[in-house]
Structure formats: structure tokens, C-alpha cells
């Protein structure tokens, strides 16, 4: 595979663009899905997805990072054949762990759905189990390509997966809903069960609609695995890697596990906050309803459908939170995760080669660009939470009204989560996997304790959930930055990395809010929101250039035309 190596920032741009594309496509999937399923149906969908995510993290994400790091190290020492040796070892290991993960999901689907007080999620959990195997196959080749500093195959597989998920998931879910609803209107029954009203029948139908949507997710992972394996075979000249005498595949497998276990557990704990919410929130909501369900209904007067009884109220509130707000919360972290993935080989090589100055420059660049992406997104959610939810979910205005205050707090949390991911990648690249694991476990403990403390109170209920995330990731970010400075020895450029992006993002959020409430108040709500976002984006870009937040080195790593760089430098718009 002869090709010009990508710089870390070029790779980050490739992954970031693909992530943005994936998120847009994901919104096109989840937004209509939430409008189809509502709060209760989304609780089934999200329950399955949140159970899949930690298993995915254990068997895929951590191992993929470990493979990327080991491929990068072996390729630097032994050339392309060193990377091929790691690929051979990882293929068997990843497939074995994928089969194990699928078996665990099938085995514990029913007990887990009962433990979280959401038995209707059972079918959806079973439907997503095979996705673990297909994702492990993808991770084998993604780790190899990323370690060889080629992010294009990973980006391509991500986009293809998201397109398949959109088409298959939406068609299957909508088709299942229509079919079962027509059966009820014709016979008064759904799969042999009778219901007095269409509203009650719909709540039962949503179990199967959510499972159908999850089947679309599973199909997308299969398509992604087939694509990236085919991409490798084409770039390898249509044949697999030649076996080399003395290739210590078993030794490499153990080395992969040694590196991957702490990384996997750290990544698991990042996603474990979702599982903590899944396991604790509905149980805590049930406690809050038992204490004073009337107060909760009065708090949301006119926002809870008549068919949603006290037994279904936890699913309704949790589905509103996880189905409507959480995908917006995850947007900025998904983008900055691409920075961490792309930076890991660069940091690993600089650290292994003793290039302290280059490593420090890369780390500061990663954090600065992460904040430049996360701050306007997070502060924008804080400023315009209500209008954004009403714009995206016009068929679910009751759920949107309930969850608007939650999304405001989540806007601040998303900034912290977005910074956590690249910091962890840097610490992992320098061999501090256990350190990141300890911080994540401490944060997860704070999250769990806060959920039980706040969500169980009737006057807070679902409104208490985001404060656990805020405390959890606030603790992790502060400790992680201290570790970067004290343990790794990286000097952080405070003004350039933190102050300038925050100032520009504050202007962006303030401009967007002012535009929505003052300047464009005569326009329709949808047009007001789009114009306000455009105004905020324009202010942000202008402020970045005016304050010198964009550096000349960023443009050099992106191979921006020299004339453009000189013109911007002459105008003092880049530092």
C-alpha cells in the first residue's frame, strides 16, 4: 500500500467530515424514528442500543484503538509487513470476541430487560445481537488502516453504514407500524392480543417497530464489514497478506489484549454513563412515581398522553430524554472522537521517538480544535434548546416540552464529554491506559450516585439526569488535564487552547439567541431558528479569524494553498 501518509489533522478532517455526514444521516434516521415511535417506543429502541454500546466498546472500540496503536508501532519498526502481522493476529481475536459478545446479548436479553423495568425492549435487544460480530470484523480492518495513517476506509465504511441504517431502519420500522396498525383497525387485535383503543394498541405495536428499526442497525453493520474487508483486499492487490516465517501471531494476540483491556474498559466507562442511565433512571423514576405520581403528572400537565399509565410513565419520560435529547448531546463528542482516533498514531510515534516538542504541539492542537468544535455546539444547545427540539420533532411536541430544560444542561455537559475523548486518546497513546480507566470509574460512580439522589425525587424526576453527567465529566476533565501536565509533562497553552475558543463560542451563542428572540421574531419559528443558527455561525467564523484562534500550522497540515495562507497571515487573521 504505497501512498503519501496523512498528517494527523488531515486524517482528523477526513474522519470529522465523515462523522458530520454520519450524524446528519443519523439525525435523518432518529428524528423520523422518534416521530414514529414517540417516548415509549424510543425507550425500547434506546434500551437495546445502550446495551449494545458497552459490548461494542469492549469488543470493538478498545481493540480497534489497540490494533491501531500496535500497527503504528510495528509499521514504524518493520515496515508494512509489521502492520500485516498485527492484522493477522487481530482478525482471529476480534472474531472470537464478537461471537462471545453476541452470545452474551442473546443469553441475557430477557433478564436485562426485566432488570431495567423495560420488558418491552426484549425483542430489540435480540435483534441487535448479531451486530457485535459484524462490528468486530469492521474493527479489525479499521484498526489496521488507522494505524497505517489512512482514515479514508474507516470514513467510507462509517458513511455506508449510516446510509444503510437510515434506509433499512426507517423502512422496516415504518412498515411494521403500518402493517400492525392496519391489522388492529381490521380485527381489533395485534398479534392475537385485543386492545380497547388505538392508543393502547400503538404502545404494544411500538415493541415490534423498535425491533424492526434495530434490525436496520444490524444490517448496516453487516454492509460496513463487507465494504471495508473488500477495500482491504483491493488495496492489498486482491490477495490476503503473505504469511511470514516466525510471525508470532499468538504473542501479538496477547500484546493486543494487554494494550486493549485498559483501553476497552476506559471506553466502556465512557459509554457506561448511558448504561447507568438505562439501569438506574427508569428504576429511580418508578420510585419517584410511587412516592408522588400525582405531583409528576401535575408538573407535566397536558404533556402526558392519556394512554400512558403510571406503569408506562418511566418509559415515556426516559424515552423522551434518550430518544429526543441524547442524539443532540452526542453530536460534538462524536466529532471530537475523530480527532482522538486520528491523533493517536501521531502521538504514539512522537512519544516513542522522544519527540517531546512535536508531541506537545500535537496535543495542544487536538485540544484546541476539539474545543473549537464542541464549544459552539454545546453553548448553542444551551441557548436554543426549545426551538431546536420543536423544529426536529414536530410530531412529538409534548415530549419536546418535557425535555427542553434537560437539554439546556446537557449542552454544557456535551462540551466536557467532547474534550474527554481526545484527552483519553492522548493518555492511551502514551501508555497511561490504567490512569484513564481509574478516572472514568470515579466519574461513573459520581454519575450513579447523582442519579439515585436526584431522579428519585418527584419534584425533579427526569430533570435530575443531566446533572449527573455534568458532575461526572467535570471531574474527569479536571483530573485528565492535571495528568497531562503533571504525569505526561505536556505544557498546555491556556489562552490559545481554552480562552480564545470559549470567547468566540460565547459570541456565537449570544448572537444566535439574540437573532432568534429579537432580530427575526416576525419570521416563522423554523425560519427564525435557521436564520439564527446561520447568524451565530457567521459570527463564530469571523471571531475565530479576528482573534487568531486558527493557526498557520493548522492550514499547513491541511495542505491549504500557500497563497491563501500568506493572504490570511498578511491580514493577521491567522497566528
Image (tube, rainbow, N blue to C red):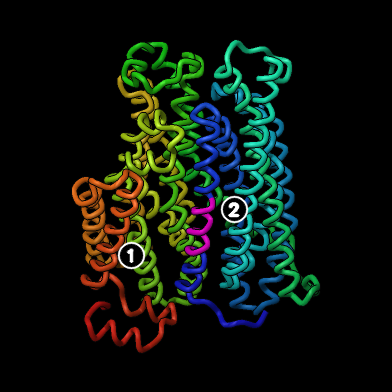
- Disc with the residue nearer the chain's start (2 vs 1): 2
Q: Please tell me whether residue 539 is drawn above or below residue 279 in the rendered image.
A: below
Residue 401: x and y in percent read 35, 31
Q: Is residue 254 visible?
A: no
| Residue at horizontal 52 percent and vertical 43 percent from the top | 30
Task: Read off the residue under disc 1.
Answer: 368
Task: Read off the residue under disc 2.
Answer: 162
* Viewer-nearest residue: 166 or 480: 166
| Residue at horizontal 75 percent and vertical 56 percent from the top | 92
Residue 156: x and y in percent read 61, 64
Q: Is residue 231 left or right of residue 473?
A: right
Quarter location, residue 1? bottom right
Q: How far is the residue under mark 2 from the one under mark 1?
A: 28 Å
Image quarter of the C terminus: bottom left
Q: Which of the numbered marks, if any, corresponds to residue 505? A: none
For the residues labelled 2 and 1, say whether their Cβ atoms are less than 8 Å apart.
no
Q: Residues within 10 Å of mark 2 (few under 14, many from 20)?
A: many
- State whether the magenta stretch is mostly helix, strand or loop: helix
Q: Is residue 424 left or right of residue 106?
A: left
Dot 1 falls on a residue whose secondary structure is helix
Quarter location, residue 144? bottom right
Residue 98: x and y in percent read 70, 47
Q: Is residue 146 visible?
A: yes
**Magenta region: which residues?**
16-25
* Viewer-nearest residue: 102 or 286: 286
**Nearest-to-viewer mark from 2 and 1:** 2
Dot 2 falls on a residue whose secondary structure is helix
Q: Please tell me whether residue 403 is drawn above or below residue 295 in the rendered image.
A: below
Amino acid at each position: 500500500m504505497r501512498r503519501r501518509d496523512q498528517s494527523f489533522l488531515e486524517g482528523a478532517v477526513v474522519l470529522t467530515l465523515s462523522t458530520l455526514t454520519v450524524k446528519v444521516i443519523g439525525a435523518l434516521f432518529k428524528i423520523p424514528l422518534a416521530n414514529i415511535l414517540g417516548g415509549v417506543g424510543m425507550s425500547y429502541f434506546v434500551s437495546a442500543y445502550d446495551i449494545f454500546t458497552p459490548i461494542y466498546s469492549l469488543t470493538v472500540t478498545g481493540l480497534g484503538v489497540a490494533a491501531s496503536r500496535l500497527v503504528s508501532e510495528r509499521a514504524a519498526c518493520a515496515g508494512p509487513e509489521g502492520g500485516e502481522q498485527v492484522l493477522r493476529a487481530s482478525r482471529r481475536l476480534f472474531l472470537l470476541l464478537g461471537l462471545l459478545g453476541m452470545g452474551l446479548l442473546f443469553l441475557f436479553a430477557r433478564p436485562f430487560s426485566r432488570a431495567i423495568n423495560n420488558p418491552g425492549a426484549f425483542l430489540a435487544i435480540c435483534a441487535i445481537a448479531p451486530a457485535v460480530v459484524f462490528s468486530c470484523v469492521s474493527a479489525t480492518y479499521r484498526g489496521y488502516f488507522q494505524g497505517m495513517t489512512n482514515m479514508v476506509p474507516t470514513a467510507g465504511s462509517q458513511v455506508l453504514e449510516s446510509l444503510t441504517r437510515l434506509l433499512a431502519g426507517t423502512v422496516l420500522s415504518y412498515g411494521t407500524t403500518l402493517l400492525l396498525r392496519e391489522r388492529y383497525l381490521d380485527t381489533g387485535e395485534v398479534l392475537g392480543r385485543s386492545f380497547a383503543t388505538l392508543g393502547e394498541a400503538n404502545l404494544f405495536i411500538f415493541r415490534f417497530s423498535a425491533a424492526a428499526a434495530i434490525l436496520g442497525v444490524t444490517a448496516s453493520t453487516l454492509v460496513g464489514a463487507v465494504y471495508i474487508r473488500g477495500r482491504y483486499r483491493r488495496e492489498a492487490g486482491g490477495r490476503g497478506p503473505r504469511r511470514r516465517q516466525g510471525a508470532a501471531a499468538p504473542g501479538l494476540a496477547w500484546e493486543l489484549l494487554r494494550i486493549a483491556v485498559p483501553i476497552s474498559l476506559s471506553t466502556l466507562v465512557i459509554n457506561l454513563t448511558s448504561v447507568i442511565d438505562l439501569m438506574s433512571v427508569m428504576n429511580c423514576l418508578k420510585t419517584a412515581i410511587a412516592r408522588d405520581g400525582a405531583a409528576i403528572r401535575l408538573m407535566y400537565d397536558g404533556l402526558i398522553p392519556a394512554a400512558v399509565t403510571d406503569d408506562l410513565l418511566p418509559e415515556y419520560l426516559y424515552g423522551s430524554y434518550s430518544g429526543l435529547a441524547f442524539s443532540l448531546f452526542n453530536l460534538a463528542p462524536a466529532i471530537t472522537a475523530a480527532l482522538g482516533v486520528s491523533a493517536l498514531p501521531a502521538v504514539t510515534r512522537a512519544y516513542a521517538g522522544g519527540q517531546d516538542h512535536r508531541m506537545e504541539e500535537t496535543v495542544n492542537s487536538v485540544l484546541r480544535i476539539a474545543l473549537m468544535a464542541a464549544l459552539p455546539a454545546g453553548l448553542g444547545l444551551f441557548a436554543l434548546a426549545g426551538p431546536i427540539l420543536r423544529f426536529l420533532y414536530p410530531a412529538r411536541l409534548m415530549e419536546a416540552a418535557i425535555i427542553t430544560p434537560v437539554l439546556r444542561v446537557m449542552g454544557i455537559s456535551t462540551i466536557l464529554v467532547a474534550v474527554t475523548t481526545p484527552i483519553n486518546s492522548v493518555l492511551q497513546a502514551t501508555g497511561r491506559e490504567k490512569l484513564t480507566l481509574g478516572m472514568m470509574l470515579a466519574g461513573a460512580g459520581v454519575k450513579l450516585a447523582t442519579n439515585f439522589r436526584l431522579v428519585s425525587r418527584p419534584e425533579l424526576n427526569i430533570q435530575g439526569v443531566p446533572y449527573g453527567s455534568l458532575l461526572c465529566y467535570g471531574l474527569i476533565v479536571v483530573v485528565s488535564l492535571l495528568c497531562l501536565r503533571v504525569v505526561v509533562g505536556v505544557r498546555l497553552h491556556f489562552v490559545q487552547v481554552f480562552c480564545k475558543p470559549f470567547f468566540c463560542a460565547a459570541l456565537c451563542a449570544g448572537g444566535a439567541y439574540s437573532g432568534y428572540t429579537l432580530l427575526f421574531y416576525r419570521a416563522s419559528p423554523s425560519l427564525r431558528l435557521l436564520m439564527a443558527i446561520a447568524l451565530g455561525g457567521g459570527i463564530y467564523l469571523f471571531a475565530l479569524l479576528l482573534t487568531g484562534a486558527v493557526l498557520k500550522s493548522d492550514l499547513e497540515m491541511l495542505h491549504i494553498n500557500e497563497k491563501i495562507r500568506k493572504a490570511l497571515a498578511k491580514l493577521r487573521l491567522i497566528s
